[in-house]
């Protein structure tokens, strides 16, 4: 599914305002090996529900850092069962307990934080993408989350040339709340990402 930046720019203009389900259907129809990634953070249920409505057996890659809140783990189990998600779980090669003993969670200003982020998020993610070799990657990136994400759009290319599809890119929390309410879908806000700490900071997957 190869597109030039010019083609992507034209498609982004065309897709703005189009219902997420239609964008997802277009991407699935043109994909050979699509995947969706999740960390079960707030509002992730929207992209998971929308994608499985179109392709119910799509691989759902979950890179679990090992530092999620109990609420997030319970939320994940609820969604896995309710949406019948085809979960493929990837975890760091070192347990959180082992890492806590030798490194802990470094402050974002600590040089060790780069090593920490590589261990708990980037390495498992790279392993997952190498195993699945997707040509389409569904994600729930939204405008307004970070400065980098503001430079993206509904469609964008990863550094490896994978087409990233973010069908809710132009949606705000109010619109997503209405989407979840209409479908009686649960949400969970007690979430912690040890690689970001600050909400408007990138973790590295999308840069």
Image (tube, rainbow, N blue to C red):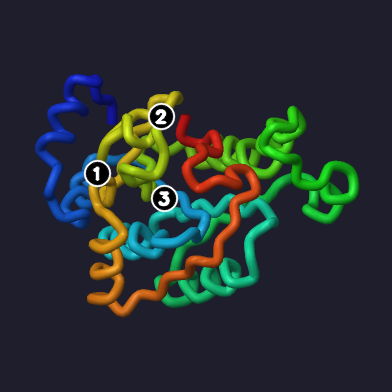
Side of 76 relative to 51 (left or right): right
Q: Secondary structure at mark 2?
A: loop
Real-space Cα separation, disc 2 to disc 1, in angstroms: 15 Å
Which residue is located at x 59 percent, y 57 percent?
A: 192
Of residues 35 and 78, the one nearer the viewer is 78
Kindly identify which residue carries mark 1.
27
The N terminus: image quadrant:
top left
Which residue is identified by label 3? 36
Name the foreground residue: 114 vs 79.
Answer: 114
In the depicted structure, whether residue 17 falls above or below residue 152? below
Residue at the spot x=23%, y=47% of the render? Answer: 170
Find numbered disc 3 in the image and state the secondary structure of the residue it sits on.
strand
Please name the residue that numbered disc 2 is placed on. Answer: 158
Give the quarter of the image for residue 130. Answer: top right
Mark with earlier residue (2, 1): 1
Are the residues at dot 2 and dot 1 in contact (C-beta closer than 8 Å)? no
Residue 122: image quadrant is top right
The reply to whether the C-beta atoms of the residues labelled 1 and 3 are less than 8 Å apart is no
Residue 48, position in %: x, y?
Answer: 38, 61
> Residue at 28% across / 25% down in the picture?
2
Of labels 2 and 1, the one closer to you: 2
N-terminal label among 2 and 3: 3
Tell which circle, 1 or 3, labels the residue nearer the N-terminal end.
1
Left or right, 113 with respect to 41, comes to right
**Disc 1 from disc 3: Cα separation:** 12 Å
């Amino acid at each position: 599914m190869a597109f030039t930046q010019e083609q992507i720019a034209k498609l982004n203009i065309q897709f703005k305002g189009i219902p997420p389900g239609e964008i997802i259907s277009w991407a699935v129809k043109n994909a050979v090996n699509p995947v969706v990634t999740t960390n079960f953070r707030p509002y992730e249920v929207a992209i998971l529900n929308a994608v499985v409505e179109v392709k119910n057996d799509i691989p759902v890659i979950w890179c679990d850092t090992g530092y999620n809140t109990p609420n997030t783990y319970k939320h994940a189990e609820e969604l896995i069962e309710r949406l019948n998600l085809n979960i493929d779980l990837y975890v760091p090669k070192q347990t959180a307990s082992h890492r806590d003993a030798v490194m802990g969670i470094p402050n974002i200003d600590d040089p060790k934080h780069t090593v920490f982020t590589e261990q708990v998020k980037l390495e498992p993610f790279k392993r997952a993408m190498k195993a699945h070799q997707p040509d389409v990657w569904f994600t729930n990136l939204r405008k307004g989350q970070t400065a980098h994400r503001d430079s993206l759009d509904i469609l964008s290319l990863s550094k490896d040339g994978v087409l990233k599809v973010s069908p809710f890119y132009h949606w705000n929390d109010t619109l997503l709340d209405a989407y979840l309410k209409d479908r009686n879908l649960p949400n969970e806000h007690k979430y912690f990402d040890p690689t970001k700490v600050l909400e408007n900071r990138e973790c590295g997957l999308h840069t």
